[in-house]
Image (tube, grey):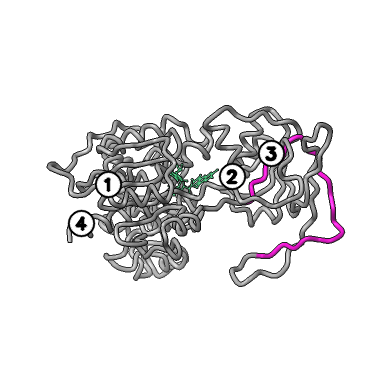
Amino acid sequence: MEGRTHVPVVDEALCGVCGVCRGACPALASPDLVEGESGTMRAVLAPQAIKSDQDLAPCREACPLGQDIGAYLACLANGDQAGALEVILRDNPLPSVLGQVCHHPCQQACFSATVQAPPSIRDLKRFAAQAPRPVPELPQGAPLAKVAVVGAGPAGLAAAWELARRGAKAVVYDAQAVAGGMLAWAIPDFRLPRQDLQRDLDYVAAHGVEFKLGQALTPEDVAALRKEYDAVILACGAPKAKKAGLPGEDLKGVWQGLDFLREAALDCPPQLTAPVVVVGGGNVALDAARLALRQGLPVTLAYRRDREQMPAYAEELEAAEAEGLKLIYRVQPVALEAGEGGAVAALSVQGTTPGQPAADGRVAFTPHPTDQRRLEAGSVILALGQKSEADAWAAGLGLFSLLGDAQGCLADGLYLAGDLQTGPATVVEAMAGGIKAARAIMEEVRS
Ligand SMILES: Cc1cc2nc3c(=O)[nH]c(=O)nc-3n(C[C@H](O)[C@H](O)[C@H](O)COP(=O)(O)OP(=O)(O)OC[C@H]3O[C@@H](n4cnc5c(N)ncnc54)[C@H](O)[C@@H]3O)c2cc1C
C-alpha cells in the first residue's frame, strides 16, 4: 500500500513480499475506497508504513537475528518449503528450535497486527524447518582461527556456527553431558520436542563444530584455553536459581524451579506430592507447573502481582489454565511449614496490594500486613528468578566486572554472549549475542 496518498494502491514491488499486509489493505478489502479521498483505513495504516526503500520491514527489524521473514513467507506462499528453509538458514542455525519456542517479536511488530491477527510467523518457520537440511558449504583450507566456546546453549551454538562458516575451527565445551543448554535441560519437551533440538544440533555439528561435553570449566581452565586458542567466548548462561531466603526453604518437598526442571529433563522427574504449589510468574514457574500437572496432581500457582504483569508468555499461561492450573494472584511467600516427618506441609503467604507505577512503569505490589493465608502443600516449587555466575567468573579471571563492549569483548581474545552477558533473556537474543561475538572475532582475525 502506498502511504503518501489518500488513495490506497497495491504496488506489487512495494507491498511486502510476504503479502501479509494485503489482507488488511483497504484497496483490496474495500475496493470502494480506491477512488476518492476517503482515508479511514489509511489513517490507521499509513503512519506505520515503510518510510523509505532503505527501511527494513518491521518484522525483520524486530528480529534480533534480522531474519528475512518476508522472503521466507513468500517462498512458503509459493509452496517452496526448501527455499524458505534456505532463506532462514542464512541467519539462523536453529530453525526447528525457534519454530517452537521463539518469543516472536516479529509477529507483534507486523504492520497488520493493529488491524488483524498477525501471521503466525513462528509456526510457519516450524513448518519450513521440517524440510531436509542442505549440506553446508564450508570454506576450504586451513582454519583461519581456533576458538573455544564455553557453553553449548543457544548463544554458544550460534557463535560456533558463525565461526565455522567464516572459516574458523570452533570447539564447544559444556558442563552437561548433552548440548543445548536450557533448550536441553530447562524447557520441557512438551514445548520443545527433543527431536527438533537434535535436528538443529546435528546441523551445527555438520559445520565441523566439535563438542567437548561433560566438562565444567573453571576460570583457571578458561585462562589456559586463552593460551591454547586464538579467542574464547564465554556463553555460560544464567543457570542458578535465585533463592528466596524463606524460613523452611530447605525442607523436604521444596524445590527450586530450575533444579526441578533440570532433574526432570536430565534424570527422572522428581515425584511430587499433592497438592503442589508453585510460586512465581515467569517461564520457569509456568514450565514447572505444567510439568507437575503431567504427574496428575492438583497444582496452584501463586504470583505476587496481577496476570497482566506476569512475565510468562500469555500463550503458555492459557495452555496451563486449559490443562487445569489454578492461579492465585496478589500473594507473596512468607515461610514454609514442616509437617509430619519434616516434609513441607504448607506455604504461608501474605496478600499484596498494587501501588503507583515506578519509574520503569512497573506497578509495585506491597505486602498487606493483615492479609495472611496458609496454602496447604505436599510439594512447593519456588521459581523466583535466575542468576548468572558473572561475579565469580570476573573474579576468577582477574577482571573488574563481566561487562563487555557492544560486541561482547571483555579483554583481548575474550568475549561473552547470551544470558551471561544480558541476564536472563530469550533464545533468539542469546543467539544474536553469540553471532555478534563470533563476527567480532573473525573481523579481528582478518585485520
Ligand atoms: C524454564 C525456561 C523456559 C524458557 N522458555 C523460553 C522460551 O520459550 N523462549 C525463549 O526464547 N526463551 C526461553 N527461555 C530463556 C532461554 O532458554 C535462555 O535465554 C537461553 O537458553 C540463554 O542461552 P545461553 O546460551 O546464554 O545460556 P544457556 O542456555 O543457559 O546455556 C549455557 C550453557 O553453559 C553451560 N555452562 C555453564 N557453566 C559452565 C562451565 N563452568 N563450564 C562449561 N559449561 C558451562 C551450561 O551447562 C549450559 O549448557 C527459557 C528459560 C527457562 C529457564
Left or right of 130, for residue 44: right
What range of the chain is rendered magenta? Answer: 363-384
Element marked by disc 3: loop
Give the amino acid type for the residue marked by disc 2 in the picture. Val
Element marked by disc 4: helix
Per the image, the residue denoted by label 2 is: 284
Label of residue 445 in the image: 4
- Magenta: main secondary structure equals strand
Spatial separation of the CA atoms under disc 3 and disc 2: 15 Å
Label of residue 90 in the image: 1
Element marked by disc 1: loop
For marks 4 and 3, the one nearer the N-term is 3
Give the amino acid type for the residue marked by disc 1 in the picture. Arg
**Where does residue 107 sit, x and y in percent of width and height?**
45, 52
Spatial separation of the CA atoms under disc 4 and disc 2: 39 Å
Question: Vertical placement of 43 versus 184: above or below?
Answer: below
Question: Vertical placement of 32 versus 247: above or below?
Answer: below
Question: Residue visible at 50% across and 53% down?
Answer: 389
Give the amino acid type for the residue marked by disc 4 in the picture. Val
**Where does residue 258 sit, x and y in percent of width and height?**
58, 42
Q: Are marks 3 and 1 in contact (CB under 8 Å)?
A: no
Question: Vertical placement of 379 versus 37: above or below?
Answer: above
